[in-house]
Amino acid sequence: MQLNQAQQEAVDYVDGPCLVLAGAGSGKTRVITTKIVSLINKHFIAPQQICAVTFTNKAAAEMRDRVKQELGSERSSLITISTFHSLGLNILKEESVALGLGRNFTLFDQYDSFKLIKDIVREKFPQILVDNSEKTVVEEIATDISTWKTSLLRPEDIAVRTIRVQVYEAYQAYLSACNAADFEDLIFKTTLLLRDNQAVRDKWSSYYKYILVDEYQDTNETQYQLLKYLTSKNKKFTVVGDDDQSIYAWRGARPENIKVLSNDFPDLKVIKLEQNYRSTQHILNCANKLISNNEHIFNKTLYTKSNVGKKVQIMELRTQNDEADRVVQLILAHQFRTHSQWKDYAVLYRSNSQSRPLEKAFREARIPCFISGGSSFFEQVEIKDMLSWCRVICNPYDDMALLRVINIPRRGIGHETINALFSQAKAIGKSLYESALNPNVTKDLIPRQKKSLGEFVILLTKLRQYILNGKDKELADELTELIGYNAYIKANTDSKVATEIKIKNVKILLSWISDLIAGKKGDTPLSFLEAVDKLGLREMMDRKNDDQDNDAVQMMTLHASKGLEFPYVFLVGMEEGSLPHKNSLPTEENQGVDNVDEERRLAYVGITRARQELTLLLAREVTQRNGVPDAIHPSRFLKELPAEDTEYYPLGTQAKTSEEQYKSDIDEALKQLESIL
DNA sequence: GTGCACTTCGTTTTT
DNA sequence: CGAAGTGCAC
């Protein structure tokens, strides 16, 4: 396929900073990948001097895939194609000396952070818990800390010393004390390093000759600064973005960065991509009309040369369960008629909780469905347990990991013993492990506790022997057995199915580590430590989409759908309170909040995922938690759609519509099924 | 220190 | 209604 004029221009301009305003479905990924290839083949930039940054691992993987098709795996593997977070991680590892951070630092996930904040608040600032629930306080502080980090603010940069700032300070102190970083730190610390250390900045900004950024509207202040430092030497880069698809303001994204760019780089070249290659005319008309209700930084209008297609269907159901059932019926009938693959269908929703009735309906209908973004492999307790074991074996001074596994499997170490360890650690200013080895600690313990603690230390020492004696692979292969983890799972999981899944998960994890140690498929063999580090750090950031390739109906939040496209899209929950979400509306409870524009962009993202057919669904009553049904209003966004491009089916009328065929189709399908069974 | 039964509380979006 | 957290009894 040929590039259109605007796309070609975006590819060809390589002499300075370039901003590509790429509407939904305008082929931006193609522009980026073509440009990377062109930089190497036409402009003779070495692959390793090109850096392409995205926001999700999925997007990075896809980009690498496409570049690989053009350049072959050898040259493409030299290019840095990664997320902002992995890029930060790489730089931090490379610069660990300049940073004073150990080579194998620990990465705290969201829940680790919550736990730490909770401990700090409980211990140092219990006064703020008096009229608020602990959970709320912890979550609010976590949000604050995240906001500060995405705004490039260290605790000492904040003038007002509120309690929250003091928690932030203690939080950072604790992280560095146990040689750890959280997700935000990967970018935050990198940016600070480049800002404050000229040698490091010069090194990296001359190393990368050309930088490309996808989904630029999602960059936050810290990421923008990072980009500026990385390009400070050559000032050659391309950023691609669309302010209409900015849906991450809540985590610090600043779509104004699009505007700021033309101030910071006066010679910025701006190119607009306005031809949409994805959706039919009806769908695109809906999208355009909807988004015209928002303010815009740059004006652009998407157009398409594709066929008109089918009108956008809007269907009203009584309850959320009816809505879920209807989606399943429609997909069943449609698939029966067209023989499409299941993965051609996507069901999108505003919040994760909306997936429940859908999942149930799909299960009942025996239609395979894949819920993306739910709980990932690396968030499963058994995986976190096992990974903590691995971490503590590599580095017994890792208090966080040690604390997690000290009583797993149960060996009778409880609060009392741990408290004794903590006070000892405080007294000698060392880690929990060193405290456990210290004879002082046992003097406050009763014999049973001493014995339990002793058993743990002996076990840990025994496991460490494997590494010290170079028996890394044996350790990975025998670890489950050595710590008796399977017996623990069996004893603590009620359902047989769940037990088997957990045992299998642990097996998978350890086989990955084992494979990394053995150096399968041409990779260089790693030590146990390196293998654990690789899985523990890098993979934690990658929310696993294991069954993504399987043929299954795709279910995900609107946020997760960005960057993807599907032939047939169902968008459920088109109700006031769901989309726009009630927390985003300017009501008395949400004082000062008005995020309706962002909610509209969310709807826009959903609509523009559809290639051929789009169905919007809504329920008219919602069952509240006490079981009482409550009336609910259609989303304001539905009224903003052009009537001539939609077909509205009010409550109870679907059977009389153009989809009335579905019923006979289903009957026929059922008959066929019955005859098979 | 562990396990059970009871309460409480709550519902955005994620690297 | 359902999950997660707390308190109480072994």
Image (cartoon, coloured by chain):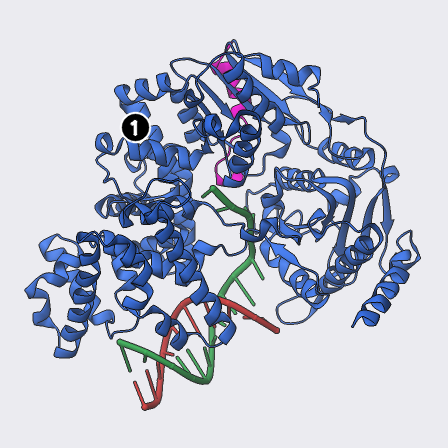
Chain colours: A blue, B green, C red
Residue sitting nearer the eye, A86 or A335: A335
Q: Position of residue A134 (x, y in %)?
A: 39, 60
What is the magenta segment's predominant secondary structure? Answer: helix
Location of the N terminus of chain A by quadrant is top right
In the picture, residue A118 is in which quadrant?
Answer: bottom left
Q: Is residue A5 above or below residue A499?
A: above
A382 sits to left or right of A359? left
Q: Which residue is mark 1?
A: A193
Residue A233, given in percent of the width and then of the height, sits at: 38, 13
Chain ID at mark 1: A
| Badge 1 density bin: few <14, some 14–19, many ≥20, Cα 10 Å | many
Looking at the picture, how far across and down is residue A473, in whole percent?
29, 54
Camera-side residue of A471 and A348: A471
Residue found at x 42% / y 46%: A539
Q: To which quarter of the image does residue A432 belong?
A: bottom left
Q: Nearer the viewer, residue A137 or A651?
A: A651
A507 vs A159, left or right, is right
- Provide the secondary structure element on which disc 1 rests: helix
Residue found 77% across the figure and 44% down from its top: A638
Q: Residue at x 67, y 59 (%)?
A: A368
On screen, A608 above or below A386? above
**Residue type indicated by callout 1:** Leu
Q: In what quadrant of the picture does the C terminus of chain A appear?
A: bottom right
Q: In the drawing, does residue A91 fall left or right of residue A334?
A: left
Q: Which region of the structure is painted magenta?
A: A249-266
Task: Answer whether residue A545 is visible to the viewer in this image.
Answer: yes
